[in-house]
Amino acid sequence: MNLKIRINLIITLILALVMVLGAGMIIDNAREDIRAEVDSTTVLALHLLDAEVLHYTSDYTWANANEKNKVTIFRLQSLDNVRHLRIEFFDALGRLRDSNRPPIGRGDNFPPSWFEKLMGKVSSSLKATHRPIVVNNRVLGELVITPDPSYEIAEIWHDTLGLLSLGLLFFIVVNGVVYWAVYRALRPLHKILGALTQIEHGQLDARLPLFSLPELSSISSKFNAMAQTLESSMMSNHRLTQQLIRLQEDERKNIAHDLHDEIGQHLTAINIDAAAILKANNIIAAHASAMAISAAARQMMNMVRDMLQRLRPAMLEELGLQTSLHELIDTWRQRNRGINISISISSALDNINETIAITAYRIIQECLTNISKHANARFVTIKVERQDETLRLTVKDNGQGFDQHLTSQGFGLAGMRERVDGLGGLFHLHSELEAGVLVEVSLPINFKALS
């Protein structure tokens, strides 16, 4: 069941309940109105008839009429317009001698039987009134006044039928209006669903228009912001992937260059010196070639160590993060003697996850590389501390900085951010022109890599 039908069904149930309650109240009020109307008519008729009975019992010349069986006292047939009462006169033998109305049959104007049953309590609560007629101590008969609410019930039925017809029309119109309003209000959902489908199929440029409803307008704004963020993230990932591939190729080219030009050259020199030793005629020439081989081997060892250090810092495994960072910063300081550096590295860095340690090392390394290349700084502050289960890194310089909104962040900053995000950490960068750069990183020490 979709939302439109569900809302219409709820409105229908509410309207039906209101109509049922309203009909119940109308019927209950009608009962009271009928009872009051019939009671008041009965009281009035009794007063009038009592006066008429008193008149005839004091002056009974009417009893000398020629047609004894047709003598009537009250001329009840002239009271046929009194609809709420049935007034009957019975003689001493119990025969009906006069009445204000003929026997009533059911016609088209009378309500259905079920409606009369609903009003049954009214009829059962109304009692007939009996007035004996006595003249000269002789009982002539009995006057019976019986409340008759049938005409009043018929009027109530016709009024109720009109109200029910009006209520049914109102019910249909309201349901139609509600269905139209709900359909119009939910029509933007088709656009939202279409935009989500576009996102699902990789069309990240999908956007929603601003809707007139405030709720849907908020959804539109949030969706467009989400799509923009996702599109920017995907573009950044593509750019980062291309930069990673390019950096990988550059690294391979540098390694190939070192192997070919440096190590290859030293291996060639070793080969030549080894051949010279084999051909040497005296110990002095052989010693000189051996010394040359030893020097070339030492240079090769240093070169291989530098290459391995660039690929993976072995000191992290051997000496830990604290010593490795000190070694990294000391080496950088020797190459940048014009920059003063303040260091605060906590000693409680043992037993840190290897992934977290490598990430912290690479972030400090990248920050120092950026400072030496771009910052033109004179002072650098580095702080590494452990707070509970979090490793916090802070690197700040007083260099020229850059405008974060105008300058695209290169691979170094993007790579740091990706490293930190991948570990569930927090990366914060703040920079302004001529105000230096501040990098703050929080890494979870208990990070566990997904298998």
Image (spheres, rainbow, N blue to C red):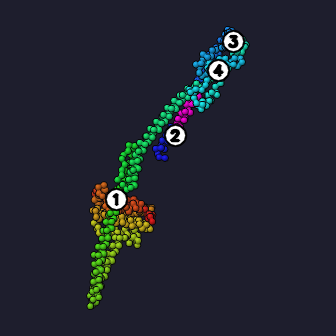
- The structure residue drawn at horizontal position 27% and vertical position 83%, both measured from the top left corner, is 272
Can you tell which quarter of the image residue 71 is in?
A: top right
Q: Amino acid at mark 2?
A: Leu
**Number of the front mark, 2 or 3:** 3
- Provide the residue span drawn in magenta: 16-35
Q: Amino acid at mark 4?
A: Ile
Q: Earlier in the sequence, mark 1 or mark 3?
A: 3
User: Split into 4 quadrants, where in the image is the C terminus?
Assistant: bottom left
- Rate crowding at label 4 as few (under 14), some (14 to 19) or many (20 or more) other CA atoms within 10 Å: many
Q: Is residue 165 visible?
A: yes
- Residue bearing mark 1: 236
Q: Spatial distance from mark 2 to mark 4, Cα to Cα?
A: 47 Å
- Residue bearing mark 3: 68
Q: Position of residue 178 (x, y in %)?
A: 45, 39
Look at the numbered discs 2 and 3 and tell me whether their residues touch, using CB distance below 8 Å: no
Q: Is residue 395 visible?
A: no
Label of residue 13 in the image: 2
Q: Amino acid at mark 3?
A: Lys
Q: Amino acid at mark 1?
A: Ser
- Rate crowding at label 3 as few (under 14), some (14 to 19) or many (20 or more) other CA atoms within 10 Å: few
* Residue 23 covered by magenta stretch: yes
